[in-house]
Amino acid sequence: MSATKIALITGCSRGVGLGLVKEYVSRGYQVLATCRNPENATALKEFLTEVGQKSAMPLDVSCKSSIEACCLAISKENKKIDLLINNAGISNKEHPDDLASNTDATEFDHIMHTNVTSCLSMTQAFLPLLRKSQEPMVINISSGLGSLTQSPRFSTTSYQCSKAAINMLTKCFADDVKDVKFVAMHPGWVQTDMGNSKNRNAPVTIADSAKGIANVASEVTLAQSGIFMGFDGNVIGY
């Protein structure tokens, strides 16, 4: 088992997170799946049991003490981590509607903390284990809506600001930590609860998104660290 690659993924109870768990298990990884309430994540629990993977671990990425506890527990059983996927994230209650003139500042702060500060804290906490891998990588799940130049709209303020910040955080880590590959990844407009909110019909399946993310990430070189890419392999402008 020591030669098996290990992926730590946040926000795995459903949606893209659960899709990524399934995808990386299919690629032979040992997956350390996390979510806020593993006992309530029925689909995740059933899948991990079915494929003989470890049970999901509790992790609230918005809580520093929860991150520290998770890191301590993982460190006791694993000498390294090869891949960290910062996937957990939220949007405003009325997603995708969130005009800047009406954005609730308290909700904005909560979204920024959950989506961005969590990536900072998770990456800092697990860097020691990542650096023990021969090919360490961090994938930050962003969004095309976080692009200042290519977003199709600018009316989902809190979410878009958080994803733009994730893109910059990815660049900052890449500039600072030269021995780890960092990539910000747009998963596509995916058929999740968020993607299909307000009776919309997202075009990308969860399975296709997860497969695309894994395929694209596997081709990113250390020289490209900090890049912002789509699950389809296209480079996205910041």
Image: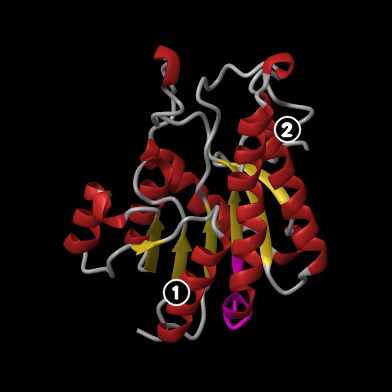
- Which element carries disc 1, helix, strand or loop? loop
Residue 65 x, y percent position in the rendering: 54, 66
Residue 47 percent coordinates (x, y)? 22, 55
Q: Residue at x 71, y 66 (%)?
A: 222
Residue 204, compared with residue 122, is above or below; it is above
The quarter of the rendered structure image containing the C terminus is top right
| Within-10-Å neighbours for mark 1: few <14, some 14–19, many 20+ | some
Residue drawn at x 37%, y 54% is 23
Which contiguous range is marked in magenta? 129-137
Q: Looking at the image, which residue is at 59% across and 63% down?
A: 122
Q: Residue at x 71, y 34 (%)?
A: 161
Observer-nearest of 144 and 93: 93
Residue 176, placed above or below residue 74: above
- Our reading of the magenta stretch's main secondary structure is loop
* Res. 147 mark: 2
Numbered label attached to residue 5: 1
Q: Position of residue 31 (x, y in %)?
A: 38, 66
Quadrant position of residue 176: bottom right
Left or right: 83, with 45 as reference point: right
- Choose between 237 and 84: the one closer to the eye: 84
Label total for image: 2
What amino acid type should be assigned to the residue bearing mark 2? Ser
